[in-house]
Image (cartoon, grey):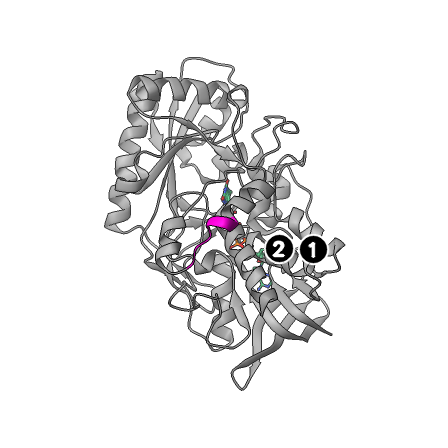
Amino acid sequence: MGSSFLVIGSGAGGATVAKELASQGAEVTVVEKGGMNKLGTSWRALKFYSGSFGPGEVSAEGIELLRTIMVGGSTVVTLGNGVRALQTELKDAGVSIDEELEEAERELRVTATPKNFFGTRTKILRDSSIELGYDVKPMPKFVDFKRCRMCGACVLGCRYGAKWTALNPLGEARRMGAKLIRNAEVEKVLQEGGEVRGARIRDASGVHEIDAQKIVLAAGGLGTPPILQRSGLEAGEGFFADLFVVTYGLLDKRGMGEEIGMATIIDEFHENHGFIISPIMDVKLDMLLSFPLSKKSIAFKRDRLIGLMTKIADDSSGRVLQSGRIEKSATSNDLKKLEKGIEVSKQILSQAGAESRSIFVSKIRGAHPGGTAALGKIVNKDFETEVSGLYVCDASILPRAPGSPPVLTIVALAKKLGSKLMAE
Ligand SMILES: Cc1cc2nc3c(=O)[nH]c(=O)nc-3n(C[C@H](O)[C@H](O)[C@H](O)COP(=O)(O)OP(=O)(O)OC[C@H]3O[C@@H](n4cnc5c(N)ncnc54)[C@H](O)[C@@H]3O)c2cc1C
């Protein structure tokens, strides 16, 4: 078995690179650890959210980290938020993605969330924020609002095909001849004389080797470093996850239905304080699994509940080991950012009419794992590692935590790599 290009992982980075390469006639094989899954309910989602207990992996220090193992990767469960993240930082590191971001925005059809798609909570929180003098913007989303039913279940995978996911470029790549091998885990990359020659994969039938002239590793911020480490390369330090909490409160008003999460954004604190604020509510099963015992009953009062997420650009202080063990805690700097965001959120919730004794803050989680094979450290400006022909193109190469949704940037980076590889 062999291919000119082997792409490991079919998420934001992998599927996009595969499409770019296949569209220019390259022979491409994508190897994906996960399978195809039915979407749209919590029970189904428990199958593909990675982690042995509940919908996430947990760091040694107790921080829950969300990602999915499935065809399409974590893009399948996004909220569709499409913003330009780290554009300046990447330029400073010698990688300009201005053109690719524009192309990505066109291709993913990024558009500001229309006001008629704001749910009741979003409107209440928007109005209260404006009364307090905050600048509330509609969130740019890669969502086809003609198909969106406002069910609020984006994080369970969209049943209506309204959201862009990596399944779109992957499908295009396959139509142009790319092969997909799914339910197959890449263990390590094989090299000879400093050059890549293939990969070792494990599937239900055993362990196999697959030849390749070039490999693009795109197994995500948590998946990529163990593969690099097993292949004899350094990786895994500098781990970030865009840590977040949700500050909740109960209103007297009843009967609020489900709605699109993160339909608006307050980003005025991003530059100086490193956080964004956006309205959101966890899904019911997640509340039952992850809320403290004293708060679990709130899952049954959803029609009165309002929540604001504080998402921070956390320190690159964690690491991912070859065994898969994740070490990640919130540093004092991270806690300061979270506290400031929580303070603003509480102020907005109170303004909206939430009783102060009903207000509580969820535990710290992260959903944007990255930084573990960072640009300038593990990969060079061409995203190539010290092994010739071995590239990395996923959230691992981001130089620092974006503190905002990274998909658009990862897609832009993958477009850049695709063009570079084909130009060679
Ligand atoms: C609940 C949630 C909501 C989010 N919402 C947004 C949002 O609205 N906007 C946004 O920009 N970002 C969002 N994100 C973050 C975004 O999904 C990720 O940052 C992005 O998908 C990362 O892309 P990636 O290519 O690094 O990894 P992924 O997209 O996760 O792809 C990695 C792929 O590699 C596969 N893989 C892993 N290990 C192996 C292996 N050993 N062998 C083969 N394959 C392997 C995985 O199964 C996966 O398919 C969200 C994340 C979560 C969890």
Which amino acid is tagged 1?
Ala
Position above or below: 173 against 214: above
Q: Are marks 1 and 2 in contact (CB under 8 Å)?
A: yes
Q: Position of residue 365 (x, y in %)?
A: 41, 45
Percent coordinates x, y for residue 60 in the rendering: 38, 58
Q: Nearer the viewer, residue 240 or 42?
A: 240
Residue on which the image places disc 1 = 173
User: Does 33 sit above or below residue 78?
Assistant: below
What is the distance, in whole Å, between disc 1 and disc 2 at their CAs? 8 Å
In this rendering, does residue 50 appear at all?
Answer: yes
Q: Which residue is drawn at 53% across and 37% down?
A: 79
In the rendered structure, does residue 97 fall within the stretch colored magenta? Answer: yes
Q: What element carries label 1?
A: helix
| Dot 2: element | helix
Q: Quick check: is the Cβ at mark 1 less than 8 Å away from ligand 1? A: no
**Residue 189 position within the rendered picture, expressed as x and y whole percent measured from the top left:** 57, 74
Specify start and end residues of the magenta stretch as a single range: 95-100
User: Which image quarter holds the C terminus?
Assistant: bottom right
Q: Which of marks 1 and 2 is nearer the N terminus?
A: 2
Q: Can residue 66 be seen in this view?
A: no
Choose between 392 and 246: the one closer to the eye: 392
